[in-house]
Amino acid sequence: MVQDAYQHPAIADVTLPEVLHALSDPLRLSIVAALLAGGPRGWGAFDAQVAASTLSHHMKVLRHAGLILTTRDGTRCQVALRPEIETRFPGLLATVVALAE
Amino acid sequence: MVQDAYQHPAIADVTLPEVLHALSDPLRLSIVAALLAGGPRGWGAFDAQVAASTLSHHMKVLRHAGLILTTRDGTRCQVALRPEIETRFPGLLATVVALAE
DNA sequence: TGCTATATTCGTCGAACGTCGAACTTTCTC
DNA sequence: GAGAAAGTTCGACGTTCGACGAATATAGCA
């Protein structure tokens, strides 16, 4: 784990193709959908069938796309949707997640 | 050019991650945006700064994602948005293209 | 002070992507 | 029929992706 806080990009630097690419992976899309439906949660709450390193990689992609906010809580991570993404791309997440069923 | 019609997938077979991936490229996104804004048009109406083979490749990606409909007109191609995509993923294109400015 | 749990980073692998140029097919025009 | 024009396909190249295991770092607990 990194000793300090995570690197989150300025929301203005996030591009639409970047966000769409982040959402174009089924696992990442399901993570975002779960966050939108159920609110923030811990790391292991996503029972993804991938190795921890792979999940960490996907979280980094989502973080770099400005979609999630990661904070530490002891040895655990709390993951939440970044609220600014709604002002940056209004309606995008709601539309995409709704279509993902 | 292929001697017969182009291969278009059944709209039901198109998946959301597939569509998002198709839209996550700036060139492809601009093509879809132009079609949505201005209606069908010919091949060369997109002054893309890429080789013809590259443009052909991107068109194939869009076609396989169920986003566009390609028809021949002599040696030229007419490209149009696939109307069924709106019933398959209602509001998606309008939302994404609006956010792309 | 260890030991355990959690998450990141690194190196690696095969597959897919985006780009190009060259060759090819089909159609139109002269 | 010959030539030009429009797209497609192919192979090549370098980059990125998604996956994994191993090694590492940090925090909590005994």
Image (cartoon, coloured by chain):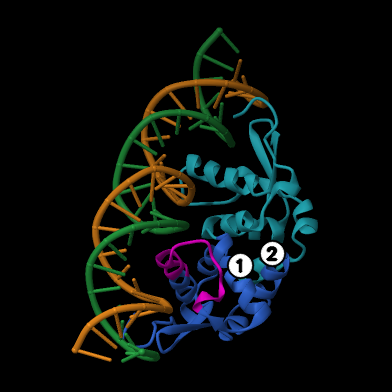
Chain colours: A cyan, B blue, C green, D orange
**At 51% from the left edge and 72% from the top edge, which residue is drawn?**
B15
Q: Nearer the viewer, residue B78 or B16?
A: B78
Q: Earlier in the sequence, mark 2 or mark 1?
A: 1
In the drawing, what numbered circle is on residue B30? 1
Residue B39 seen:
yes
Neighbours of disc 2 within 10 Å: few (<14), some (14-19), many (20+):
some
In the drawing, what numbered circle is on residue A11? none
**At 75% from the left edge and 48% from the top edge, which residue is drawn?**
A12
- The quadrant the C terminus of chain A occupies is bottom right
Left or right of D2: which side holds B25?
right
Q: Amino acid at mark 1?
A: Ser
Q: Nearer the viewer, residue C5 or A12?
A: A12
**Most frequent secondary structure within the magenta stretch:** helix
Q: Is residue B48 magenta?
A: yes
Q: Which residues are magenta?
A: B43-58
**At 50% from the left edge and 41% from the top edge, which residue is drawn?**
A52
Above or below: residue A98 compared with residue B9:
above
Image location of residue A44, percent across then percent down: 58, 45
Residue B80 seen:
no
- Secondary structure state at the residue bearing disc 2: loop
Q: Are marks 2 and 1 in contact (CB under 8 Å)?
A: yes
Above or below: residue A53 compared with residue B90:
above
Image location of residue B28, percent across then percent down: 55, 66
Mark 1 belongs to chain: B
Mark 2 belongs to chain: B
Q: Amino acid at mark 2?
A: Ala
**At 69% from the left edge and 75% from the top edge, which residue is drawn?**
B94
Image location of residue C17, percent across then percent down: 45, 58
Left or right of D16: which side holds A84?
right
In the drawing, what numbered circle is on residue B100? 2
- Secondary structure state at the residue bearing disc 1: helix
